[in-house]
Image: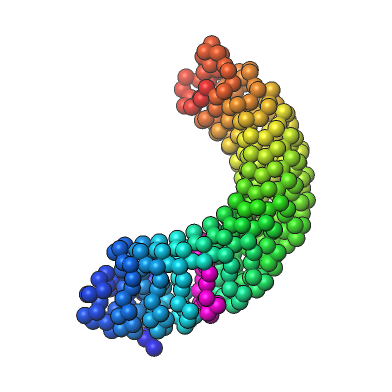
Amino acid sequence: MAQLLTQQELKEQRVFRSLTEALKEPSEVIVLDLSSKNLKELSEEIIRFENLQWLDVSENDLVKLPDEITSLTNLQVVKAHGNEIEELPIDIGKLERLKVFSLHQNKLKKLPESFCELHELERLDLYVNSLERLPKNIGQLKNIKVADLYINNLDGLPDSFDQLTNLRAVYLGSNRFKKFPAQLFGIEGLEILDLGDNHLKKIPKEIQQLSNLNFLFLFENKLKKLPDELGQLITLIELDFSDNQLKVLPRTLGALTQLQELNLDYNKIKELPLEITGPKSLTSLHLTFNRLEVIPDQIGDLSALNELTLDENPLLNLPESVFQMDELKSLDLSGTSIHEIPTRVGDMESLEYLNLGDLNLSRQQQTKIRGYFSANKTIQIVF
């Protein structure tokens, strides 16, 4: 076996960019880059590169990888993304030293069971494929830190998925999940979870077990209610529940003291609980296209807020406290029922963007509003 190089050492090696050139001295080929060459197939002669550790065949027209590739047991990196690959060699697991295997943007419908023998893999890079299921022994990939399965046809996870205890990020957006995959609850170190654009109707209370979550994306689902247990995820930095069917919010959201971004656009929310002002670190609050008629005066307690979208809500006015938000840079009131903008808006020193579109304001009103701001102030006002 040739000496395995570190990732940094591999980057410092001579790069062969032509198969013809490489075949002249096959034993010297450690890094072979055949990317973007309109290849429809990969030559079987690749078997001659017994010292090959880095292979890039990305952005071609390959429909498969040759079986011979499994004999190149020194391979640490294979980049095969951006092809038309429909299946992998049945013995792909022989590449037991493989650390990086990029397979995104292909046409894979399934993975061979031997894929689970790639024990050195650090990332499941399989987004934008046609996967309908994962191998039942996927839990054997103990070194996986990121599982990117965005845009596939998955509707469930194998039971062994909860054995991927080193996982820190899971991307399952744009799949076919109807139920929240319970296998995730056993991965306590998870920091990023994306289940957006699926068919989820409920979030189980067991979500509280994901006590290290920083980012939770559940946009474009069919959620009508959020569990109170969300309030126990106190490490959350960003929450996205946009484009669901939420009518009420749990008061426990107020316990998320580290939350910085909260997206609730395109729901059916009629009222904001006072506790929503609990996360004092909140910098972005999106409430576009809901059914809000009143904003609580306590909204001003969000002293770090620099972006507030209230457009397309049946609001008649804003509380005084909004105009006292010193850090607010962007305020969207378009499509609301507000017809009078108070002079106090001109005192908002940090405001850079003010959207007042579709408020049916007369030219006289528009001129008056512009006059609220100092001539020296740079601000974009949309009418």
- Is 34 above or below relative to 342? below
Task: Tell me residue 137's x, y (percent).
Answer: 61, 76
- Is 135 above or below relative to 104? below
Task: Tell me residue 357's x, y (percent).
Answer: 55, 24
Residue at position x 54%, y 30% in the image? 351
Left or right side of 168 for 203 = right
Residue 235 quadrant: bottom right
Left or right side of 380 for 265 = right
Task: Tell me residue 301's x, y (percent).
Answer: 70, 36
**Along the viewing direction, whichever of 59 and 9 lies nearer the viewer:** 59
Q: Quadrant of the N terminus?
A: bottom left
Left or right side of 90 for 316 = right
Residue at position x 60%, y 26% in the image? 335
Q: Residue furthest top?
A: 364
Task: Tell me residue 85's x, y (percent).
Answer: 43, 67
Total numbered labels placed on residues in the image: 0
Left or right side of 22 for 358 = right
**Along the viewing direction, whichever of 377 and 187 lies nearer the viewer:** 187
Residue at position x 70%, y 32% in the image? 291
Residue at position x 74%, y 43% in the image? 249
User: Does residue 365 appear anywhere in the picture?
Assistant: yes
User: Does residue 97 appear anywhere in the picture?
Assistant: no
**Colour mapping used in the image:** rainbow
Assess whether residue 352 is covered by the magenta stretch: no
**Start and end of the magenta stretch?**
110-127
Residue 263 quadrant: top right
- Is 153 above or below relative to 340? below
Assess whether residue 124 is covered by the magenta stretch: yes
